[in-house]
Image: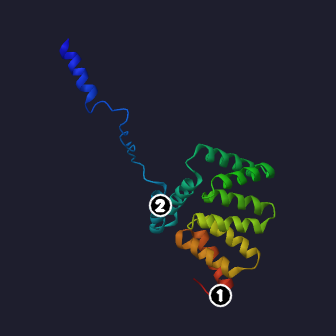
Amino acid sequence: MHFLVFAGLVLLSGPFCARADAPAPPKQAAPSDAPPRAKIIDDLFARLAQAPDAESAQPIRALIERVWARRGSATADLLMARAESALKSGLEAPATALLDRIVALYPDWSLGWRRRAQSAAAHGDGEGAMRDLDRALREEPRDFLAMVELAELLREKRQDGPALDLMRRALALDPRNDALREETEALQRQVEGREI
């Protein structure tokens, strides 16, 4: 019995029992095998640049778009799903309200700005769409979809030179995109009168 009392006192006074005034031990971060989002995107772009043909590039491109489409927050992803549903249904006011909220809450999410630009363009606000696409590209400089959309808006304004620059940037990121290559070559012939 005395031994049990003594052992209990030793345990209470030893390193196994933290004193009330002792600092808490630092918390260890849970190990994660998942690579960070930025690394995933970097790896996918490297694979896209090295894809041997259009067929092998297509699923890589789709994966990039899928990563961009998810913020990683349940709230953000739900808001975007509702906004996209409203856009597809032609519900202008709810889509605009949701997209305004998304860019206010998540200003570094390129997709929010790109979707808001699409909504603005669909309702005749070309200037607003261009501003939002410019912001999308500041948040994600490799957003080749935003580049192509912005190039289309610039072409509508007869600004073919800047549009061609954007198309070339998009093609450099997605070199096996045959449709994009054809559009870029056609625009270059129009601007410069020669083949790429």
Residue that numbered label 2 is attached to:
44
| Residue 91 pos. (x, y %) | 79, 49
Residue for point 67% across, 60% down: 113
Residue type of the residue flagged with mark 1: Glu
In this orientation, does residue 189 appear? Answer: yes
| Residue 149 pos. (x, y %) | 68, 67
Task: Name the one closer to the observer, 184 or 101.
Answer: 101
Q: Secondary structure at mark 2?
A: helix
Question: Does 138 appear above or below 2?
Answer: below
Residue that numbered label 1 is attached to:
192
Which callout, 2 or 1, points at the residue further toward the start of the chain?
2
Q: Secondary structure at mark 1?
A: helix
Residue for point 54% across, 60% down: 61
Asked whether the beta carbons under mark 2 and mark 1 sit within 8 Å of each other, the answer is: no
Q: Is residue 68 left or right of residue 22?
A: right
Dot 1 alpha-carbon crowd within 10 angstroms: few under 14, some 14 to 19, many 20 or more: few
| Residue 170 pos. (x, y %) | 58, 71
Q: CA distance from mark 2 to mark 1?
A: 33 Å
| Residue 102 pos. (x, y %) | 67, 52
